[in-house]
Amino acid sequence: MPRIAYVNGAFVPLEDAKVSVLDRGFLFADGVYEVTAVIDGKLVDNAAHLARLERSLGEIEMAHPVPLDTLTELQLELARRNELTEGGIYLQVTRGAAERDFAYPKDATPTLVMFTQERNLVDDPRAKNGVAVVTTPDLRWKRRDIKSVAMLAQAMAKQEAAKVGAAEAIMVEDGVVTEGSSSTAWIVKDGRLITRNLSNSVLPGVTRLSVLALCEELGLEVEERTYTVDELHEADEVFITAATTLVMPVTKVDDRIMSNGAPGPIATRLRQLYIETARRTSVG
Ligand code: PLP
């Protein structure tokens, strides 16, 4: 079955999904994006993804391509046309095509592009044994709270991880962990969960938000604060969260085997509960 993408009002075969070389997403990374997980053909945590999209657009004074409720309909229609039961929907909005000039153009129409990716989320084989991660310097800009498509620094970090067979790079700045290259990083110490507090230094993860709610439900104590690489190395458990991995246990950090090389009990419980909750609350 041919993959179908959505480009500016039309559903088209992926190979015909094209935007202009003058598109500011291409020329300036002048765009923002979201990835929504799909489980059982339904959208997981999508209201929070669209709320974050709205905030990202606002922060860079970019017009909405379509109203938010129309976006949900388009996402569901795209999932349906691709017969997507599990994976993700990638959605990108750019400021559109305009004569190349740094300042924002006055009359450009935003570009909206969407495509789907099949992915094993619930039965992700990596969740069984946990993944390896490596620490890398955080080379990014100062507005990481905006889900910008300018992700060369993250691609470089992920490549460092890939070179040594690790699944994720945990980025570090001034001795403290910021986040994963495409995930939120968490540690557990003495039964307490620790994840970075929100600020311009990190992306406000949607999965992070849902996991925080689950922690509250379970009565788990959480500290939202900076933590050092030493704390990461000495944690009882480490895990990462993202729409593309859900809750993913980490069993190796740099050269250290974590939680005796097996997914920790808290990460395991949160993964289970996250999936149950996602199945109950997803939209479609
Ligand atoms: N942090 C960064 C830098 C990311 O790129 C991502 C996801 O792509 C996340 C965190 C996790 O965010 P979410 O849980 O909304 O997928």
Image: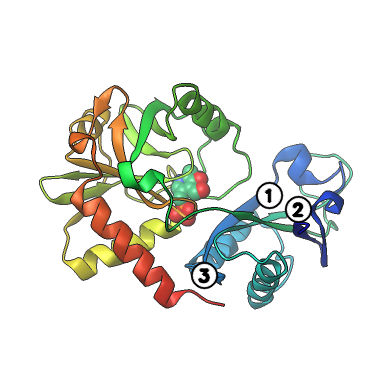
Label 3 packing within 10 angstroms: few (<14), some (14-19), many (20+): some
- Residue 138, by quadrant, is top left
Q: Are marks 2 and 1 in contact (CB under 8 Å)?
A: yes
Q: Is residue 232 left or right of residue 89?
A: left
Q: Is residue 9 left or right of residue 237?
A: right
Which sits earlier in the primary sequence, circle 3 or circle 2? 3
Q: Residue at x 43, y 42 (%)?
A: 201
Q: Residue at x 48, y 74 (%)?
A: 282
Q: Secondary structure at mark 3?
A: loop
Please provide percent x and percent y for residue 20.
87, 46
- Of labels 1 and 3, the one closer to you: 3
- Residue kind at label 1, given as amino acid type: Gly
Q: Residue at x 19, y 67 (%)?
A: 218
Please provide percent x and percent y for residue 99.
89, 43
Q: Which mark is residue 184?
A: none
- Residue 208, by quadrant, is bottom left
Q: Are marks 1 and 3 in contact (CB under 8 Å)?
A: no
Q: Which residue is mark 2?
A: 95
Q: Which quarter of the image is occupied by the N terminus?
A: bottom right
> Can the viewer see residue 59?
no
Q: Are marks 3 and 2 in contact (CB under 8 Å)?
A: no
- Of labels 3 and 2, the one closer to you: 3
Q: Which mark is residue 40?
A: 3
